[in-house]
Image: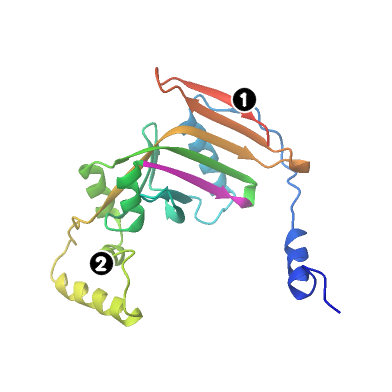
Amino acid sequence: MVAPTGAGKDSLVDQHVAGMRVDYRTSGFDVDALAPTWHEQLQAWFAEAEAATVVEPNAMVLATTDDDGRPSSRTVLCKGIDARGVAFFTNFTSAKSRDLRASRYASATFPWYLVHRQVHLRGGVELVSPAETRAYWNSRPRGSQLGAWASAQSAVVRDRRALDDALDAVTQRFADTENVPLPAHWGGWRIVPEHVEFWQGRTDRLHDRLRFEQNAIDRTWTVRRLAP
């Protein structure tokens, strides 16, 4: 007897996953509760996520596309939020940097599951200034600085030993150097948002979605409510 399509062990796993859900019983969120600007609202929610002990509240999922429009995403750490945009730092030879140079556009999402919130933004990208990059570089732990020198990010490596050997080599190279220099292949990107959406989970999947949208002509901002 032939089993029905989808029956068996795999279907049981699917049913288990499909049945997973959380009913978000959080208070409402409306336009009159928003800060005057998107970055002030993001900073406020960021502080609340931090106060709620969200693990790495500055972690955001960065999405980019390559020359052929194929998307990819990865988690990076936000290192700056202000009126100009949201900044992060990385290796300029990485896959994400290649994508950003090609498309000059990106999106990012802060997934604060613990507090039933997320913030999604998208827009053009620009390089962080050399002065800001150097200031951040100088604040990094020495081990992180050495790691940036050792890793040709996104390149294929033979094995873990090759990576460890590269770190040993740069550790010896800068052993007598008090301040590890900033490598030319490393720096910051800033997403300059055109849209910033604040999402608050609500019961029965009727979530609150409020989006700041920038007018492309006069650069003014409007807030719109979106259906969940």
Residue 2 image point, x, y percent: 83, 77
User: Residue 87 bears which disc, if any?
Assistant: none
Residue projecting furthest to the left: 176
Camera-side residue: 59 or 69? 69
Camera-side residue: 136 or 215? 215
Q: Is residue 204 left or right of residue 90?
A: right
Residue 107 lies in the magenta-colored region? yes
Q: Could you tell me how far apart the alpha carbons at marks 1 and 2 are, in whole angstroms?
A: 46 Å
Q: Tell me the element at label 2.
A: helix
Q: Is residue 52 left or right of residue 141?
A: right
Q: Is residue 54 left or right of residue 84?
A: right
Residue at the location (22% across, 49% down)? 134
Residue 223 image point, x, y percent: 56, 24
- Residue indicated by mark 2: 146
Residue interval drawn in magenta:
105-113
Q: Which quadrant: the C terminus?
A: top right
- Residue indicated by mark 1: 31
Residue 59 shows in the view: no
Residue projecting furthest to the front: 1
Residue at the location (23% across, 65% down)? 149
| Within-10-Å neighbours for mark 1: few <14, some 14–19, many 20+ | few
Q: Is residue 150 above or below residue 31?
A: below
Q: Overall secondary structure of the magenta stretch?
A: strand
Residue 118 image point, x, y percent: 58, 44
What's the residue type where badge 2 is placed? Leu
What's the residue type where badge 1 is placed? Val
Q: Is residue 228 above or below residue 89?
A: above
